[in-house]
């Protein structure tokens, strides 16, 4: 019950805050422009679903490549750290 009430309060606060910010003319025009762009893109992708699939695949491939590169870098750093700790342990054992 408390969790549900919290979520409703957050949602109501967001809606009220959004409505208050729409009292500014510049904000309204910005929101209108962005909604038009969003609507145009939705219409385009509804008419050209193959393009939407192609873009999704391209973005997925790019994100996967970035993730793989990041993981490789992290593994290299961990390997270097392991080598460094082994050198320190050997030096401590000899000292």
Image (spheres, rainbow, N blue to C red):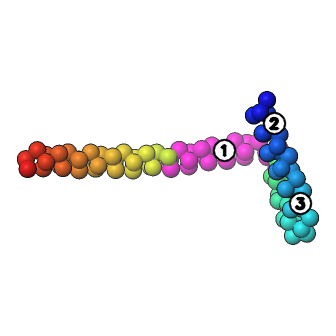
- First reached walking from the N terminus: tag 2 or tag 3: 2
- Quadrant that contains the N terminus: top right
Query: Looking at the magenta stretch, what is its main secondary structure?
Result: helix
Of the pair 8 and 31, the residue shown nearer to us:
8
Q: Which residue is mark 1?
A: 56
- The residue most toward the left is 94
Q: Residue at x 56, y 49 (%)?
A: 62
Q: Is residue 36 visible?
A: no
Residue with the mark numbered 3: 20
Q: Work out how far the residue at label 3 is from the one at label 1, CA to CA, in angstroms.
A: 35 Å
The residue that label 2 is drawn on is 5
Residue 63 within the magenta-colored segment of the rendering? yes
**Going by the image, does 49 lie left or right of 64?**
right
Q: Quadrant of residue 29?
A: bottom right
What is the x, y in percent for residue 48?
Answer: 79, 45
The magenta stretch is 44-66
């Amino acid at each position: 019950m408390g969790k549900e009430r919290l979520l409703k309060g957050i949602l109501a606060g967001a809606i009220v805050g959004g409505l208050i910010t729409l009292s500014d003319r510049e904000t309204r025009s910005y929101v209108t422009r962005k909604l038009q762009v969003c609507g145009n893109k939705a219409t385009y992708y509804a008419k050209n679903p193959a393009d939407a699939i192609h873009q999704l695949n391209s973005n997925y491939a790019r994100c996967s490549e970035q993730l793989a590169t990041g993981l490789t870098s992290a593994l290299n750093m961990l390997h270097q750290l392991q080598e460094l700790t082994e050198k320190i342990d050997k030096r401590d054992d000899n000292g």
